[in-house]
Structure formats: C-alpha cells, structure tokens
Amino acid sequence: MVTPAPTTNPSRPKMQGNPYVPMPATVKEVIQETPVIKTIRVVLDDENARTNFHFEPGQVGQVSVFGVGEATFVIASPPTETNYLQFSVMRAGEVTSAIHKLNVGDKVGVRAPLGNFFPYTSWQGKNVFFIGGGIGMAPIRTILLHLLAHKQDYGTISLLYGTRTPNDMSYKYELEDWLNREDLNCNLCIDTAAPNWPHRVGLIPNVLKELAPSPKNTVAVLCGPPIMIRFTIQALQELGFAPEAIVTTLERRMKCGLGICGRCNIGGSYVCVDGPVYTLKQLQSLPNEL
Amino acid sequence: MSAYSYLTAQEIPTLVERLAPHFEQVLVPTEQKGVKESVIFAPWTKGSPISLAKATVPPKAAVFPKCETLFSYKIEKDTQDAPKLTLNPEIYAPKTLIFAARPCDALGLNILDRPFLQSHYVDPYYAAKRDKLCVVTLTCPSGCENCFCHWVGIGPAATQGADIVLTAIKSGYVAQAMTQKGQELLEKCAFKDGTDKVPEVNQARKAAWESLKPAPDLSQIHSTLAQSFADLDFWTQETQACLSCGACTYFCPTCYCFTITDEGDAQSPQGGQRLRSQDNCMAQLYTREASGHNPRPNKALRMRNRVTHKYMTYKETWGAFACSGCGRCIQHCPVGLDIRAILLAAIARTTNTPDMQGGK
C-alpha cells in the first residue's frame, strides 16, 4: 500500500461577526430518537449565513432557546449535509428540556462553529475504530459518515455503538443500513440482555475487549459519558493502543464557547477552543482533572 | 511640553474638573457609609468628594460590568406567517476615566486584556469599553496591610496600564503622562510644569519600595504548583476553612469568569435580554453539568483551579501571573484564607518532599 503523503489538517472554521450573537435559525425537523433523546434539524434563516457556513466534523455549536438560554452540542450532521444542521440532544437540564419542546417552525439561535475538530487527515491510510456510548454517538456519527463518504482514503472502518437498552439506541432508522454496509464493520451492544436482541450484550469496555481490534495501524475514536470514556480508554490501552492513537471528544459545561469565561478548562486547556477533540496523549500532558 | 505637571493637594478636584469634560463618565474613589465603610469607584459630578484611599472594590466593572446586556431578543408569532425573531446587540461603551486607581488596579486591566482581546476571538463588549478607557493611577505611598504586588512583579510605584500617574510629594502632587493619550489630556489641563519635581517623585517612589518586606521568589511557582497539582490532601488541607462564598473572586481585579443567562420571555411584548454577569468559580454549581457530573465537585478542587489559574495556567498561556497582588481576596475573606499562605505552603511542600524521580 502506498503511504499517503502527510497532510496538514484544514484550517479551523470560526464564528464570524459578534461571537456572542447567535445566527437566527428555524427548526425544520424534529426526530424522537429515544425516550430522552431528540434530534433537531435546523436551517439558518439568513441566506448569506447559510452560504458562508462551513465547519469540520467534531466542531460544536451553541443552540439558543431564547428566554431559556443556550447549551453546547456537537454538530451531528456531516459537513457534506448542506440542507440543515443537526443536533442530537438528551433531555437533562433547562435548555435541553426547552429544546425537547420545540416544534417545526420554531425559532432558535446557533453560534457555530466552535472548537477544534477530528484530525481525520492524519488518519488517512489507517484503520479507524469508532466507539460511541449513549448520546456520545452524536459526534461519532458525524465523523463516521464523513469518513464513509471518503472511504477510499482509509483502511477498515469499524463501529462499536453501545447503550443501556435497545430503546436507548439513537439513529435506529440508520442502524440497519450500517449493519449491512460492506464498508462498515458495525457492532451494537446493550448493557444487559433483552428479549429479541440479536447483537452483543455487555458494557462497552468489555465488549471492546471481546472484539479485540488490533492496534496495528489503527486509530480508536471514542465518545460517551465520562465513566465510559475512562474505562474504554483503559481497555484500549490494554489492547495495545498508543496514547496518540486514542482520540476522544470531551464535554464540559460551557458558557461563552470562546475560551474566556473559565468554565470548561482542564488546567490551561479550554475544551471550547483547544478541544473538544483531544488525543489521549494530549490529555496526559494536561493536569489530571477529568 | 513636559510629561510632568505639578499641582497642589487642593488642586486634585481641579484636575478632575479639567479632565472630566473629555469623558462621558468619570469614576473616582468615593467613600461609602454603610455597615462596613468602604471606598468604591463611583461616577463623579462637580463637587462630589474624592477619596484618595485605595478602593475596597477594584474598578474592573468599568470594562467588565457585574452585569451587562449582550443583546435583546424578541419573537413575534404570526398566525399567517412564520414567526419573526429579532436580535439586537447592545454594546454600551461610554468614554470613561478611572481616576486615582492604584498600580495593582491598572495592572489588573492589563491582565484582563489578554483573554478578552488576544485570544481566539476579540470580545466586542470588552474591546469597546477598553478602547474608550483612560486610567489615572496614584502611586501608593507604601505597601498596605495585605497587599503583595511586589511578589507578582510590580510594586507600589509601578506604572503599567496607566495613562497618567499621580505621585504625592511633600508640596502636592506630580502628574506624569505615560501614554500619548495621557500626555494630550495633561496638556489640556494646563497645570504648572512639574519637571523640577522629578527628583522628589523618584524619592517618593523609592520610599514606597523601601516600605515593603522582602518577597519570596515566585519565578518557579508555576512548576511548584504543577508538582502539587495531584496532591489532593494538600489542597484539601489548604481549603478546609473555605466557605465557597466567592468574596475573593468578586473583589479580585483580575478574575474574569462570567456566566450568560437569559432574562425575559422571548414572546412577551417587550421580549428579553441575554445577559453576561460576573461569576464565581468557587461556587459548587459553577462547573456542574446538566447530567449531574461535576468535574470540580469539592472546594479543594475549585481552590486548586483558582490558584493554578492565577499562578500556573494563565502564566503558561500568557507569560504573566493573573494576579496583581492587591490583597483584596485576603482582606475580604470571611474566614481569613490567605492565597499567599497557599503559595508558600506549596513551595514548602515541594522543597520538603524527597524527589521520587531519583535525584534532581
């Protein structure tokens, strides 16, 4: 195989204009993914804003419900999807509850793109093993679809997606396709056995160890709740993945999204601008504050 | 024209009067009676008394208000058509003079400038206010009870961040222009030339420096704190008395944490505002996520974040401390926590801990 020439990542798209003022947008579609997760698809109202909007997979946006506030979500649609921006939102607090009450036609605000993105050009020629836990599947979906759209540049692309129960699986309408695709090695798992579940059963780190992907020429990309990230990273290290070959995307409480307000930092690294995507190697160089 | 003007003590109000026409707002240290007497930077009008005491609260609100509107929002629903969303940014930036701040207050502004102006984005609300700000500082005659500005690289006669520096001499005050802006203003004020008083100014500055006790060496404090970072027992012990009240952050000239909240129903006739308010990193809810997960759930971790931000991570990013040594966090802490003691304890801890890596 020809080793591709080293490429640098594209430069980071940033928000334009007053970075505190969201772009007005309209809800185009609402999808109830699970009892607690909804996906909203929004369209920016301003035509210029729509035309000039570019982002890279892994970048995040702040979604505003005016009168309630704003919260950070990954842009869960791939950059190739230009008809809408998609955010998958688990109902947890005030803003997410307000997002769950939105209907088609409602007005929201979007501040995006924020943060860095997956260093996918450095993965060219390598196998990529994606691991998504619960709502952590949202960023994984973005980069997974992006890689599948450019699959000729990569080796084997695999996915392990786990949730607590079958009901907690988002993107059910796509899973059948993912399982059948020739170009994707897709594995699903749930925490404990359930009737009529034909896939794997067990916690993600354990199922990962059963699958035992080879670390050779492979990058592991994971996202999920903090506890899942911690134990999955351990499992990956046991399997022999090097810290620079483990990539995760973090979530922290954020307000400004601009690297100022002081909420999301891990030591001196601000998740909103220096993240949310980090390699384990980068995280190891930061104070242990996860 | 010379950079120095001379005025008598009685002419301090005259100086303010002559400066004031060039500004929309003049903030001067003003005595405030209350349960606890304090000195605050209050808007000056002709005849209002001017205190030259060190203010209880630093003047950072001039550029970073306790609360400000980022924009107003309103959604008008229409039965026939799509709803209409209006967003109106509001940047309020009056031309402001801060009068008789102390060197630590002026340095505080420089410390705020970096994250607000030199990071990934320029903060337009801060930038507009900062651009229209002029700062007159007053040289401290000596160190004060809790201050430690000379620990962090300045001193009672430091001039960083000032457009004009006032220094008390025996027969009055000398005003020295430090910037072009300051020079132009002083020229317009038309006081007597103070060049012949320069030796007295230098003497006053020297005397101020000589009043200070020797400072410990903080040149390696960032690595000292990095070495102490994982020692939770250390941080727990140092933080035992803390109430997480946040007085230290609100009185601090360099703390710039903020929150963003919405006030007002978008669909009401008057709409609402998105506000930015000063926040407090010592509060338990500060970092708590909607899921309940909290990366800094206890006060030891929060104090560690506060201390390491000021003396380690801010320094790693910007090459300077995020502390101007004003000592207000010490003076106003209800339980007497002293950030200097934490730094010294970290130094002592590192010096006394045998190197586990096997030799230095």
Image (cartoon, rainbow, N blue to C red):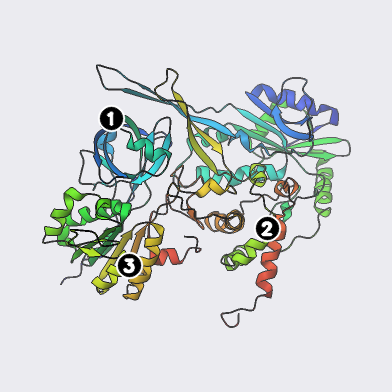
Q: CA distance from mark 3 to mark 2?
A: 38 Å
Q: Secondary structure at mark 2?
A: loop
Q: Which numbered dot is residue A205?
A: 3
Q: Secondary structure at mark 3?
A: helix
- The residue depicted at 60 percent of the width and 53 percent of the height is B306
Percent across and percent down for residue B48 are 77, 23
Percent across and percent down for residue A246 are 34, 66
The amino acid beneath tag 3 is Pro
Q: Judge from the rendering whether residue B181 lies leftward or rightward of residue B46; answer left or right.
A: left
For marks 3 and 1, the one nearer the N-term is 1
Q: Which residue is mark 1?
A: A45
The amino acid beneath tag 2 is Gln
Q: Judge from the rendering whether residue B278 lies leftward or rightward of residue A206; answer left or right.
A: right
Q: CA distance from mark 3 to mark 1?
A: 42 Å
Confirm or deny contact between disc 1 and disc 2 (CB under 8 A). Answer: no
The amino acid beneath tag 1 is Asp
Q: Judge from the rendering whether residue A5 lies leftward or rightward of residue A67; answer left or right.
A: left
Between A32 and A191, the one nearer to me in the picture: A191
**Residue with the most extreme bottom position:** B358
Disc 3 vs disc 1: which is toward the camera? Answer: 3
Q: Which residue is mark 2?
A: B240
From what the image shows, is residue A189 above or below residue A14?
A: below
Provide the chain ID for the residue under circle 2.
B
- The residue depicted at 58 percent of the width and 26 percent of the height is B94
- The residue depicted at 43 percent of the width and 33 percent of the height is A68
